[in-house]
């Protein structure tokens, strides 16, 4: 049980508390975790779950992955339509962060049914209902534009939330090799996550930079030297790909994606500068 994360221990605590209340459905578990994040501010105590708008309101892919993991390790079981802890799971839940546990014990007693917590969450957090299949929202007027985003330091849920809250319709991957040590950001997995959120994925490897050219870089000056070379070689020869991005950005909201959180250490920043200079279009960095 030493390999459990703090948030997994709180997940167990939530399941146990809700089971005692007679309703530990997956829906109820996820929505309680959401309120723990957004109202109880458990994220200020431990590294916690992030959420994004999905079919039934706020959702977390990481949470669902943790539920599956905890089931496979014998800490959680399915009890009809509810989740329940095994004896092993109960022992693990006792080791949860004390302050986070106190907030959890208070939170799980607030709502008696899926309907009750859903109505509360939908009323208080409408920004997380924009993808919901449970309500019909008026068509939103979206202004086309070009954005950039890096996934460094983000989990897949906070990344998707950033895209959805900014009405991104196409994510353009400008990595040379769409692989990541965070497997959720490899091409196949990322495409699957995006498709479920009605966001199109487009890979333009021609605008990428070989990883070996970055291996020994550490200072901003070293990156600037590399990017200057990139600007006078790759961007000069790949004007067609730049035009493709510009044309898409004039029709809908698109985001150029690479790894680095800081665009000054990422070639997507150079692509953005080229678009602003050559095509007189503004680019927003998320």
Image (tube, rainbow, N blue to C red):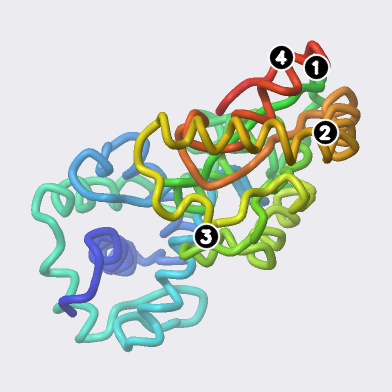
Q: Is residue 271 above or below residue 23?
A: above
Residue assigned mark 4: 282
Residue assigned mark 1: 278
Rendered-image quadrant of the C terminus: top right
Residue 68 falls in which quadrant of the image?
bottom left
Label 1 sits on a secondary structure element that is helix
Depth check, mark 3 against mark 4: the one in front is 4
State the residue in front, 58 or 27. 58
Q: Residue at x 20, y 85 (%)?
A: 88
Determine crowd level at label 2: few under 14, some 14-19, many 20+ residues with C-alpha closer than 10 A. many
Residue assigned mark 3: 61
Residue 42, percent from left and from top: 25, 43
Q: Is residue 90 above or below residue 36?
A: below
Q: Residue at x 69, y 35 (%)?
A: 255
- Chain-order first, disc 2 or disc 1: 2
Determine crowd level at label 3: few under 14, some 14-19, many 20+ residues with C-alpha closer than 10 A. some
- Chain-order first, disc 2 or disc 3: 3
Can residue 201 be seen in the rendering of this structure? Answer: no
């Amino acid at each position: 049980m030493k390999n459990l994360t703090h948030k997994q221990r709180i997940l167990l605590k939530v399941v146990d508390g809700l089971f005692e209340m007679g309703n530990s459905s997956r829906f109820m578990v996820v929505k309680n975790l959401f309120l723990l994040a957004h109202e109880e501010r458990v994220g200020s105590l431990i590294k916690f779950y992030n959420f994004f708008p999905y079919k039934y309101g706020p959702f977390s892919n990481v949470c669902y992955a943790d539920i599956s993991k905890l089931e496979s390790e014998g800490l959680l079981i399915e009890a009809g339509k509810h989740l329940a802890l095994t004896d092993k799971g109960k022992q693990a839940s006792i080791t949860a962060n004390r302050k986070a546990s106190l907030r959890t014990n208070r939170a799980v007693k607030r709502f008696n049914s899926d309907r009750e917590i859903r109505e509360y969450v939908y009323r208080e957090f409408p920004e997380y209902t924009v993808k919901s299949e449970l309500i019909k929202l008026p068509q939103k007027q979206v202004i086309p534009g070009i954005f950039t985003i890096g996934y460094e330091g983000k989990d897949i849920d906070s990344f998707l939330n950033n895209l959805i809250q900014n009405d991104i319709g196409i994510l353009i991957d400008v990595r040379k090799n769409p692989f990541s040590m965070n497997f959720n950001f490899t091409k196949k997995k990322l495409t699957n996550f995006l498709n479920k959120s009605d966001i199109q994925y487009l890979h333009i490897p021609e605008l990428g930079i070989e990883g070996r050219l970055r291996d020994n870089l550490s200072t901003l000056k070293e990156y600037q030297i590399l990017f200057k070379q990139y600007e006078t070689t790759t961007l000069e020869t790949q004007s067609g790909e730049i035009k493709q991005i510009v044309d898409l950005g004039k029709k809908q909201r698109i985001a150029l994606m690479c790894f680095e959180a800081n665009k000054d250490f990422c070639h997507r920043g150079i692509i953005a500068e080229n678009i602003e200079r050559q095509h007189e279009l503004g680019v927003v960095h998320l």
